[in-house]
Image: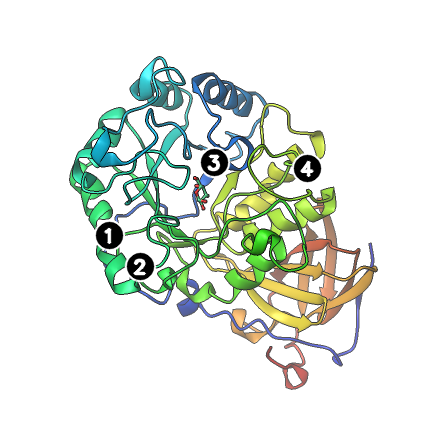
Amino acid sequence: MSIRAIGACVAMVVTTSVAAATGGAAAAADNGLARTPPMGWSSWNQFGEHIDEQLLVQTMDAMVANGLRDAGYVYINLDDGWQRHKGERRQQPLEADPVKFPHGMRWLADYAHQRGFKLGIYSGPGQTTCAGFTGSEGHEQEDAKLFASWGVDHLKYDSCCSHKDTPRDALQPIVRRMSQALRATGRPIVYHACHCGWADIWEWGAQAGANHWRIGQDISDDFDYPGNREKYYFDVLDMLDRGIALGKHTGPGHWNDFDMLVVGLNGRSRELVGAGASNVEYRTHFSLWALAASPLLIGADVRTLDPYALETLSNREVIALNQDPLGAPAEKVRDDGPLQVYAKPLADGRVAVALLNRGSATAEITVSPGRDLGEPWKRYRVRDLWRHADLGEVDIPYTAEVISHEARVLLLTPVPGSTAAPLPDSTTH
Ligand code: GLA
């Protein structure tokens, strides 16, 4: 690795303020949950609707054995496909599929809770869900009570298909209705209002009681696919660009959700489109979701994760950035074509930066965290969170070498008393 101090000719200043970090919109409807981004596993990206009790049990057992639970991944979220019936709600009740889940949902929640997990479930405000299963329309209170009686801890309430074109004003009471129904149960249930990044949900989701909301359409298992696959899906970089620009709407209790992780899918998803990504690209994807304070929901089959993917998902130093109590989003502080720097201030005054090389050749990227993160110290202690290496004290600005599609993640600790940085040369991006 090469990090070297350079002159003040290239500089950028981290401008993220604590005000932005704590989320512009005060969440009047805050239910007190999800103070840090939810972490766990979700069934959709790998399995689609092909889910059952055995898969869930094996998933939890695997996450205990491979350390993912202890790394913080505690929400085990059933996505679409747990329901018994396809077709409209007015035609049939909402029930768990007794063939897929022979012991029922209460048993599954107990199994989860006994092992330190939480159980998530999925429904939507339409007559049917996206995969055509029975939805919750007109039965919000009844369904919230049912979920609570099962011991459910998280609900993904998906309006992507049933309300795609519903105007924002009409959608808000629909999202709020389930929020209030969940609240009325008295059970703490994290509420994901999934609306595929439409109707500017980040502007009002918190007020409607949501703990997280998707900032875009479904992710595909691609790092950088030209355009949108099938004119719909967003690859990792599409999602990043969209979500980073919305950072002011995220914060403790109300998070921008960049969609579930594709790390480890390797183009072999049963459900998602996409050709897969390289190990480095998956690691970059994980790093940026962590810095952006997105929920971290593993989408791969954790029973068969390859060692590299497991190591990626298990990096506790990177996870700690995601779970930092300040809850600040990453801000893009340098945008030099394919060479970019993202910075996330932390509660203890340190700053995490990701040096992202979107280009096709190894390049040097320069960073200069500055005055808006506190005192403008000239020297920082630097730790590389993927190499697990302390790089010593460096003067800023400084430069690091980054290979193609890599994101170097550095934790910067100001050295108190060091001389002020050369701020007059700094420019804000
Ligand atoms: C939508 C959502 C996905 C998934 C499916 C289930 O496409 O965006 O995340 O929940 O529905 O049918």
Task: Establish whether ligand 1 lies closer than 8 Å to the Cβ of label 4.
Answer: no
Residue underneath mark 3: 40
Alpha-carbon span between mark 1 and mark 4: 37 Å
Alpha-carbon span between mark 1 and mark 3: 26 Å
Amino acid type, callout 3? Gly
Could you tell me if residue 352 is visible in this image? Answer: no
Residue underneath mark 4: 266
Residue underneath mark 2: 166
Task: Establish whether ligand 1 lies closer than 8 Å to the Cβ of label 1.
Answer: no
Q: Position of residue 22 (x, y in %)?
A: 39, 62
Alpha-carbon span between mark 3 and mark 2: 30 Å
Crowdedness near tag 1: few (<14), some (14–19) or many (≥20) residues, C-alpha within 10 Å: some
SS type, badge 4: loop
Please tell me whether mark 4 or mark 3 is closer to you in this view: 4
Alpha-carbon span between mark 1 and mark 2: 10 Å
Mark sitting on residue 313: none
Q: Position of residue 51 (x, y in %)?
A: 46, 25
Residue underneath mark 1: 174
Alpha-carbon span between mark 4 and mark 3: 19 Å
